[in-house]
Amino acid sequence: MYGWWGKALLIDLTKSKVKEVSIEPDILHGFIGGRGLAVRLLWDLIPPGVDPLSPYNALIVASGPLSGLPLPSSGKLVVASKSPLTNGYGDGNIGSMASHHLKHSGYDALIITGASKKPVYLYIENGKVDFRSAEDLWGLDTFTTEEKLVREHGRNIGILEIGPAGEHMVRYATVISQKGRSGGRPGMGAVMGSKKLKAIVIKGNMEPPIADKEALRKISEESYKKIQGSDNYDYWIRQGTMSTIQWSHQNSVLPTMNFREGMWELYETISGDLMEKLKIDRRGCPYCNMQCGNVVSDDVGEESELDYENVAMLGSNILLENLKRVAEINKLADKLGVDTISLGNSIGFYMEASERGLVKERVEWGDFKAVREITIDTAYRRGLGAFIAEGVMRMARSIGGEALDFAMHVKGLEVSAYNCHTTPGMALAYGTSSIGAHHKDAWIISYEVRTDRSSYSRDKVERLIFLQNMRGGMFESLTTCRLPWVEVGLDLEYYPRFLSAVTGLKWSLDDISVSANRIYTLIRAFWIREYMGWSSSMDYPPTRWFKHPLTKGPYAGSHLDISKYSEMLKIYYEIRGWDENGVPKKETLIKLGLDFTIPVLEDIVKLR
């Protein structure tokens, strides 16, 4: 078999034992890798209803058939688990040398179960696993942890680690690599913390099985040239995702004051133009020739890697107007191992609750000193930080009443940095995202703004599903970065060509779309299995976008129409082959080869 190793390492932290397990070719062909492989392994391996922070939950680290190979932006891997933030499926991708080393280690995935009594880290070299004490690393920030591990094992390694936020099981703690690469928004870092697993160090030098190396070399060389020849390449290199600050403000979608508004008159204080003037370096993932990591010197003179999402959520969303100060909070979050999007959302929620007099401790909009203290206290679950560490959904439920109306989350995952008062397609993207309110599955908002942003049409729903299948299905499972396609227009047809050259099997975009539908439908089945009381209400965006109109800018007075959104959602279900409650129909499950889920789901819901 080419493209995959066909095996995974099952690592039991409770017993300090390792077992090699085979992965059937049908599973690899049907689910591709990365996210697809991860959700299939989670379905098979963890008991329904498991506590996400118990030893019985599993952490999956999965590569895909294109991960770590010499082709554009392939330095990605997926970390996945049942989420302690949402109680559903959770994952994230990380650009890291860990992707390269896992691919060259002889395995497609790591399956980590159990929990150690004392802090440990794993050292994995070509499939051999050592359980090493991490008691001297426990309590350290992620940057210091990585420095110590590099001194111990050399630079030619891949490292995934957690900071104090993961150790203290902050519900949106992430996994960090290479001093700023962060992934796993739904609390993958907390899962590692619950297992007393401080870090995973991977070293591999085995040659992955590739069907046609010469064909892969030619296609890769051609695609790298296409990327550099793009009309948008130079501007992208200068600003990366940071250009989106100005774009979002101009289009009234910039999250401002806990998503109350879509514009901010001080947006230039955190803009891409300003970042470009302050920029001192640029970083990227392995095999990338369009690096997106823009590095600036923060408020205390230390390096901080910025992108749009963290700057918008820690800037305009909480009215923090100094980019160097935003950079300092961002760097702190990376060192502590906490998700910047959920952090900015949770702080924004608290600031609004404070403004409304719903909480005792006052925190003003834009108060840098308070935000800095809250960020640190959140990672250690101290004082007010212990409350904010729970995330917006639980905070709102604790306060109750009107707080539920301005809690910006879907299924428990905080909304990322796009205000959707006037963009129903992006609202539906958040509502139906596979992990909760995240933009990575379908950034349809740019399409909406260019076309008819107020439309609730079938065409828009079809476009959304296409984007989900490509971004959240194909890219998350290959596993490679979506930005060459999204930002500089690399033709999607390159990806089935890559996959065909690597695996020796003939792939088309249609074939990949079938796999993507299979992956999305299994993820939905996983959510239903874990929730037991599933309904279509789970697929609705925050109440604010329906009840609280914008008050500023050209769209003042605008908000989403709930009846029209409901019609869009019905169309979405119809196209996916799900019933009116968002439950996959029996015929859909059979058609996609997911009939193994039917007996489980029939004990929970009525399958149409």
Image (cartoon, rainbow, N blue to C red):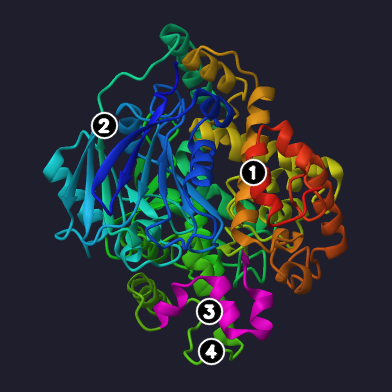
Foreground tag (2 vs 3): 2
The reply to whether callout 2 and callout 3 are in contact (CB within 8 Å) is no
- N-term-proximal mark, 3 vs 4: 3
Which stretch is magenta?
384-409
> 215 left or right of 373?
right
Task: Name the residue located 77 percent from the left edge and 46 percent from the top edge.
Answer: 578
Q: Secondary structure at mark 1?
A: helix
Q: Which residue is mark 1?
A: 597
**Vertical placement of 381 versus 205: above or below?**
below
Q: How far from the left and from the top, in percent, is residue 465?
A: 72, 40
Amino acid beneath label 4? Val
The reply to whether callout 1 and callout 3 are in contact (CB within 8 Å) is no
Asked if one can make out residue 455 in the rendered structure from this viewpoint, the answer is: no
Q: How far from the left and from the top, in percent, is residue 23?
A: 45, 29
Q: Secondary structure at mark 4?
A: loop
**Looking at the magenta stretch, what is its main secondary structure?**
helix
- N-term-proximal mark, 4 vs 2: 2
Say few, some or many: other residues with alpha carbon within 10 Å of mark 2 (under 14 / 14 to 19 / 20 or more): many
| C-alpha distance separating marks 1 and 3 | 40 Å
- N-term-proximal mark, 2 vs 3: 2
Amino acid beneath label 2? Gly
Q: Which residue is mark 3?
A: 350
